[in-house]
Amino acid sequence: MNRFEKWNELNNLNIYYCGKEKCKPKHSFSVRFKEEYLMHFIADGEGVFKVNGEEYKLKKGNAFIISNDRGYYEASETNPWTYLWVKFSGELANSFFKANGISEAHPIYMTNEPEVVAKCFEEFLQNERSNKFLMFGKFLELMGTMTDTNAHKPEENIQTTVDEYIGICKKYIKDNYYRKISMEELSACVGLEYSYIFRLFKAELGVSPGSYIINHKLSKAAEFLRNGDMNVCEVALAVGYSDRVAFSRLFAKKYGMSPQKYKLTEHK
């Protein structure tokens, strides 16, 4: 066993092949692996990635990872992507995914600095056929750069769990209850597709994200009515409802009485 093979074994990182491609419009491919990962980083352009029943519209700065589930990806017809790719495996690869919140349930990555990551990827590719230590070093540098510039990096580089995803959403709702919260905003705050967030909320909380937002707003409204001097119209505006009638209808459905009656009954 030579020194390189021993180093590779000790660090448990395997690099199989890598490359770069400027795709033609609508260029597509479908592939799957077992216990190995194929990562594409989008240096320019746009495209679609489909896996496990989900569809992701991706652009410059995104990366997508294919492993046990068959993945299909297709370049945009009007703005086809250019991507850099690498196939690799090992415990160090798993640590990299955990540090960046990447999993089979969430196989997407986004950087704040696409040019920096693309430069590191290019340098790694340039050393593919040179000194193997240098090649592995450049790949480790790439992994470190992607982690440092992760737009949705989990706190303290710990794998984002289901509870943490939901916790992030809850905090966002708590901090923004006073205005209208769109599902696009909620998706952006955790870097997940809305369909996945919807499934998490239903499975863990028994309600949809939209229902959770409404319930939180109404709970705050009830708190204001009990403890404050605001009238019903002011309370409605304070929790993000410009339509007092719609607010009153939702409030009555939750509490069994109108906001005005609730204020008269419960006000301290």
Image (tube, grey):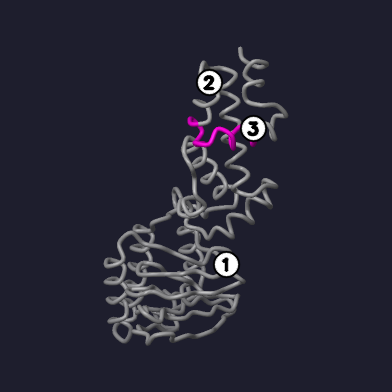
Amino acid carrying label 1: it is: Glu
Front residue of 68/205: it is 205
Q: Which mark is residue 251?
A: 3
Amino acid carrying label 3: it is: Phe
Label 3 secondary element: helix
Q: Which residues are magenta?
A: 237-251
Q: Which mark is residue 104?
A: 1
Q: Nearer the N terminus, badge 3 or badge 1?
A: 1
Which residue is located at x 66 percent, y 20 percent?
A: 261
How far apart are labels 1 and 2 at the CA level?
49 Å
Answer above or below: position of 4 versus 173: below
Q: Which mark is residue 241?
A: none
Label 2 secondary element: loop
Percent x, y for residue 151?
38, 56
Front residue of 44/39: it is 44
Give the main secondary structure, helix, strand or loop, of the magenta stretch: helix
Residue matched to label 2: 231
Percent x, y for residue 89?
50, 75
For the residues bearing labels 3 and 1, Cβ distance under 8 angstroms? no
How far apart are labels 3 and 2 at the CA level?
14 Å
How far apart are labels 3 and 1 at the CA level?
40 Å
Which residue is located at x 43 percent, y 76 percent?
A: 47
